[in-house]
């Protein structure tokens, strides 16, 4: 979709929100809380951003973008070159970070710009009368995007702000937050990797994996994720429909081998975080190297992220 920027708001010194609408004013495809969209900026760089506007704002998508100091053309271009009236190319919403409909309580932990998908969840839970608390960690209030919104009705009382918590004290704070919740409550987290790791470590002491939900927006290196690294050996893939077998050499992705054979799989991030390239798997043991499938999905071994994952067995049979 090509959408027009109809509003820009400076949420903090380095976080700016953009409201995007259709040129003809039509309603946009709906999404569930936690969903994100691909946004291609003026430099042609595509990035994923969580949708964080009110869910009843059906004519717009709102995203918030932090200007990264080490930006490779994604966030900096959106801050520096995009104005009201600019046109951005946007993908349809995808959701890898959904609320669990069966949970009777939800505890949301966001840090910094990681609050954005949780804001969308908070809108939905408020509308449903759901039982939830959003814990929002930031260096100080001036760094906390949407702090005024979250500090006022209808969010007031549902959001706890934690400013300036030092790394050494984080586990203690997180434990206190969890102690205040039902032991059955589901936990959701988004933010810098060390923060999410701390939340997961703390929550895992009292909850099963299925009750802990997280979303990565940057690829996390796994032990064998670097091409040529440990376990990066050649293997074969077979297409279930035609029986055609192809070899995936070291350092080449499954999706590239398929592409060379004329089979195009949609991709977006090519880093194992967006889930666009996931395909069904019928046989073989995958070496999951992505950050988009959940642990449960990985354990099922019935789908594979073809841009980064490889094989532990000599052959994978893809349902293609
Ligand atoms: S293209 Fe994003 S996970 Fe593969």
Image: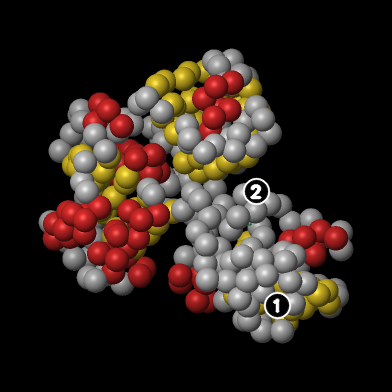
Instruction: Say which quadrant the C terminus sits in.
Output: bottom right
Q: Residue at x 46, y 71 (%)?
A: 296
Question: Residue 233 bears which disc, if any?
Answer: 1
- Quick check: 241 left or right of 301? right
Query: Farthest residue toward the bottom?
Result: 314
Q: State the SS at label 2.
A: loop
Name which quarter of the figure residue 77 lies in: top right
Residue shown at 54% from the left, 30% from the top: 76
Q: Is residue 254 above or below residue 132?
A: below
How crowded is the residue under tag 1: few (<14 C-alpha within 10 Å), some, or many (20+)?
A: some
Q: Which residue is mark 2?
A: 268
Whole-percent x and y of residue 214?
Answer: 40, 57
| Ligand 1 has an atom within 8 Å of the beta carbon of the residue at disc 2 | yes
Most foreground residue, 27 or 123: 123
Q: Nearer the viewer, mark 1 or mark 2?
A: 1
| Residue 11 vertical placement versus 264 (above, below) | above
* Quarter residue 113 falls in: top left
The image shows residue 73 at horizontal and vertical percentages of 60, 34
- Give the image quarter of residue 198: bottom left
Front residue of 274 and 192 = 192
Q: Quadrant of the N terminus?
A: top right
In 3D space, how far apart are the residues under numbered discs 1 and 2 (Cα atoms)?
25 Å
Horizontal and vertical percent position of residue 26: 58, 25
Query: Which residue is at 66% across, 66% downward?
Result: 227
Q: Is residue 121 left or right of residue 319?
A: left
Colouring convention used in this rendered image of the protein: secondary structure
- Asked whether the viewer can see residue 16, the reply is yes
Q: Is residue 82 left or right of residue 118?
A: right
Rate crowding at label 2 as few (under 14), some (14 to 19) or many (20 or more) other CA atoms within 10 Å: some
In the depicted view, which residue is nearer to us: 78 or 128?
Answer: 78
Task: For the residues labelled 1 and 2, say whether their Cβ atoms are less than 8 Å apart.
Answer: no
């Amino acid at each position: 979709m090509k959408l027009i920027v109809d509003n820009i708001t400076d949420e903090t010194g380095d976080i700016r929100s953009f409201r995007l609408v259709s040129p003809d004013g039509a309603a946009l495809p709906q999404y569930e809380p936690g969903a994100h969209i691909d946004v291609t900026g003026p430099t042609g760089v595509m990035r994923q951003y969580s949708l964080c506007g009110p869910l009843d704002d059906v004519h717009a998508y709102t995203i918030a973008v932090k200007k990264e100091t080490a930006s490779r053309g994604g966030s900096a271009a959106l801050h520096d070159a995009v104005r009201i009236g600019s046109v951005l190319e946007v993908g349809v919403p995808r959701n890898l970070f959904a609320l669990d409909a069966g949970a009777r309580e939800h505890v949301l932990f966001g840090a910094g710009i990681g609050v954005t998908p949780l804001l969308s969840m908070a809108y939905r839970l408020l509308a449903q009368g759901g039982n939830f608390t959003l814990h929002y960690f930031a260096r100080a209030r001036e760094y906390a995007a949407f702090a005024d919104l979250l500090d006022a009705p209808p969010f007031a009382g549902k959001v706890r702000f934690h400013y300036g918590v030092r790394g050494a004290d984080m586990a203690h704070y997180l434990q206190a937050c969890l102690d205040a919740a039902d032991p059955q409550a589901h936990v959701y987290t988004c933010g810098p990797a060390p923060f999410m790791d701390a939340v997961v470590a703390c929550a895992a002491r009292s909850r099963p994996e299925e009750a802990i939900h997280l979303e990565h927006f940057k690829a996390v290196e796994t032990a064998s994720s670097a091409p040529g690294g440990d376990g990066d050996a050649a293997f074969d893939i077979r297409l279930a429909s035609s029986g055609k077998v192809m070899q995936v050499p070291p350092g080449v992705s499954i999706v590239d081998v398929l592409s060379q054979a004329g089979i195009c799989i949609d991709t977006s991030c090519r880093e194992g975080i967006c889930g666009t390239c996931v395909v069904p798997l019928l046989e073989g043991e995958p070496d999951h190297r992505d950050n988009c499938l959940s642990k449960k999905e990985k354990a099922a071994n019935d789908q594979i992220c073809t841009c980064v994952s490889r094989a532990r067995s000599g052959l994978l049979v893809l349902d293609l």
